[in-house]
């Protein structure tokens, strides 16, 4: 008997050790079998930062260089003609990228107060400029041209000091890099850019900053084979310093979006309004027109707190995470209007976060009768997020007979409710005192029998 137990134990131990030692192979079947580290789904809300040399002209778009020299966009060409010497080059903008007011600790405090759980910074956008002192950047980096500080490293430190998770955006393609231009001319049958730049710089980035998110982008002109993506991911999952915690998105080649990778972004501002078969993220932006900061932005372009919470509720209810973008300025500040939005969000989440963090999808995601009511579920409670104030509200997805009690988050008193004519729950809104709420959206918590 003892021998059998011993054998069983040995077998179990062997099993545990051998599963622990799973190595992923550089193909999607193997890579896609990796479970998504759990912290990500629990976190729900992240902050996205588009910052780079494009923040210097800060006009129209973070695609400024390409609008100017690629698309020959009228507004951008005129802007340059009107305001700069005829021979001014995009590279010259970098020497004005001083970031003289950059206080990463203050940023991180703001992000903490916003209620976000992770922060994703553009380490390199399609312009190719690296926001860290990369060995592979041919001087086109923060230490040699521009601010002369390590913008990535400083933010990583500050963000982690607030117990937030740190992640990095990284663009595979670089519009005007001669190696990329050559590869493209060769129909992507050569891969100079990937061998001499993308691959070594991504390993460098991971080894130096240990990001827990790699938010890949700029993949769309070539396949995952050109980018050697599966090979990189196998290294990331097997041998990198973040192999157990890192999550990645799905932008690894023109054939991978909404198909392969970690969580799925699919498209920018993806918010499908229905359940997905895979964990997904809605990357959206507070300035409706641009990811990078634009000095000509007006108040009408800025999402209201109501828009933002609506977007959040609609995302979380269907199992997504929301990644909320703001574009910092070239001086290293975050515009007060963005600060205000993030703080309003934080106030709301402070009261209503239990319906958001670590929540799951419920059997209904929106209400069958009342518009703009979204549901989540957590620890056996059901939460109904209501986006507007009503004297009475019918929860058409909630059976009257299943409800023991109802609470309005942020209010102490119990909520009065009755049975609607068709057997659902009819709630009378409690009297709200001004201090009790960030009056943007109301969360009802259903305690079920
Ligand atoms: C971060 O977490 C640690 C350990 O849980 C805690 O001691 C510390 O106070 C936290 N810091 C902040 C800024 O929340
Ligand atoms: C994807 O990129 C490859 C080059 O790597 C190209 O040959 C192929 O046509 C592209 N596919 C699509 C659907 O654009
Ligand atoms: C992909 O990367 C690996 C490791 O660096 C290398 O051995 C391989 O040749 C690369 N494949 C392509 C197609 O570049
Ligand atoms: C609820 O969502 C479904 C799609 O999943 C949609 O067809 C329906 O109109 C929504 N209902 C309301 C009341 O918004």
Image (cartoon, rainbow, N blue to C red):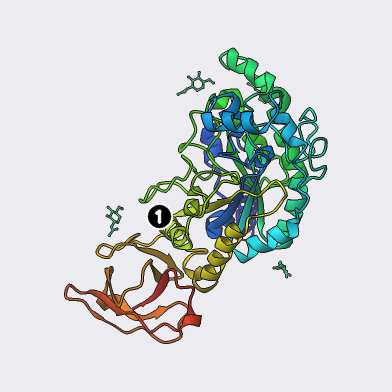
Rendered view: 110 above or below 292:
below
Is disc 1's CB within 8 Å of ligand 4? no
Which is more toward the observer, 152 or 87? 87
Ligand 3's quadrant: top right
Position of the N terminus by quadrant: bottom right
Residue at numbered disc 1: 318
Disc 1, SS:
loop
Q: Looking at the image, can residue 319 be seen?
A: yes
Q: Residue at x 58, y 59 (%)?
A: 337
In the image, residue 294 lies at what x, y percent? 59, 45
Report whether 425 appears left or right of 171: left
Residue 26 visible in the shown view: no
- Taking 340 as reference, is 126 above or below it? above
Could you tell me residue 243's position as x and y percent? 67, 45
- Horizontal side of 365 relative to 139 (left or right) equals left
In the rendered image, which quarter is residue 168 located in?
top right
The image quadrant that residue 126 belongs to is top right
Q: Position of residue 328 (x, y in %)?
A: 65, 50
Residue 312, above or below 126: below
Q: Residue at x 58, y 65 (%)?
A: 343
> Against 310, is 258 above or below?
above
Seen as rendered, the residue at the extreme front is 82
Residue sticking out furthest to the top: 186
Please name the residue shown 64% across and 60% down the image: 111
Q: Tell me residue 245's x, y (percent).
A: 64, 50
| Mark 1, other Cα within 10 Å: few <14 / some 14–19 / many ≥20 | many
Q: Residue furthest bottom?
A: 413
Whether residue 113 sits left or right of residue 408 in the image: it is: right
Work out which quarter of the rendered image holds the C terminus and state it: bottom left
């Amino acid at each position: 008997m003892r021998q059998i137990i011993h054998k069983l134990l040995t077998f179990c131990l062997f099993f545990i050790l051998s599963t622990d030692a799973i190595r992923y192979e550089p193909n999607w079947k193997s890579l896609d079998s990796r479970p998504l580290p759990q912290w990500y789904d629990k976190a729900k809300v992240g902050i996205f930062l588009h910052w780079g040399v494009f923040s210097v002209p800060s006009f129209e778009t973070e695609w400024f260089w390409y609008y100017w020299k690629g698309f020959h966009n009228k507004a951008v060409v005129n802007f340059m003609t009107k305001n700069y010497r005829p021979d001014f080059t995009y590279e010259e903008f970098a020497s004005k990228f001083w970031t003289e007011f950059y206080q990463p600790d203050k940023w991180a405090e703001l992000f903490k107060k916003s209620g976000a759980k992770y922060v994703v910074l553009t380490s390199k956008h399609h312009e190719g400029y690296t926001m860290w002192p990369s060995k592979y950047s041919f001087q086109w980096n923060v230490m040699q041209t521009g601010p002369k500080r390590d913008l990535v490293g400083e933010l990583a430190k500050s963000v982690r000091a607030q117990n937030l998770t740190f992640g990095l955006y990284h663009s595979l393609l670089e519009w005007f890099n001669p190696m990329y231009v050559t590869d493209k001319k060769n129909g992507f049958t050569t891969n100079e850019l990937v061998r001499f730049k993308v691959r070594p710089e991504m390993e460098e980035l991971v080894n130096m900053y240990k990001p827990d998110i790699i938010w890949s982008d700029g993949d769309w002109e070539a396949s995952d084979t050109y980018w050697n993506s599966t090979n990189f991911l196998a290294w990331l999952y097997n041998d990198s310093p973040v192999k157990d915690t890192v999550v990645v998105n799905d932008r690894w080649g023109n054939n991978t979006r909404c198909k392969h990778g970690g969580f799925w972004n699919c498209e920018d501002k993806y918010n499908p309004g229905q359940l997905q078969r895979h964990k997904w993220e809605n990357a959206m932006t507070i300035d409706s027109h641009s990811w990078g900061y634009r000095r000509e932005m007006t108040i009408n372009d800025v999402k209201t707190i109501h828009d933002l919470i609506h977007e959040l509720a609609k995302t979380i209810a269907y199992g997504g995470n929301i990644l909320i973008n703001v574009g910092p300025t070239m001086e290293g500040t975050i515009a007060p209007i963005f600060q205000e939005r993030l703080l309003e969000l934080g106030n709301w989440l402070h009261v209503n976060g239990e319906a958001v963090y670590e929540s799951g999808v419920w059997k209904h995601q929106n209400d069958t009768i009342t518009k703009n009511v979204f549901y989540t579920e957590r620890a056996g409670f059901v939460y109904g997020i209501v986006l507007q104030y009503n004297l009475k509200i019918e929860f058409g997805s909630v059976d009257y007979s299943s409800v023991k009690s109802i609470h309005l988050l942020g209010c102490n008193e119990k909520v009065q409710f009755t049975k609607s004519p068709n057997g659902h729950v009819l709630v009378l809104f409690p009297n709200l005192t001004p201090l009790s709420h960030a009056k943007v959206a109301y969360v009802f918590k259903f305690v079920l029998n």
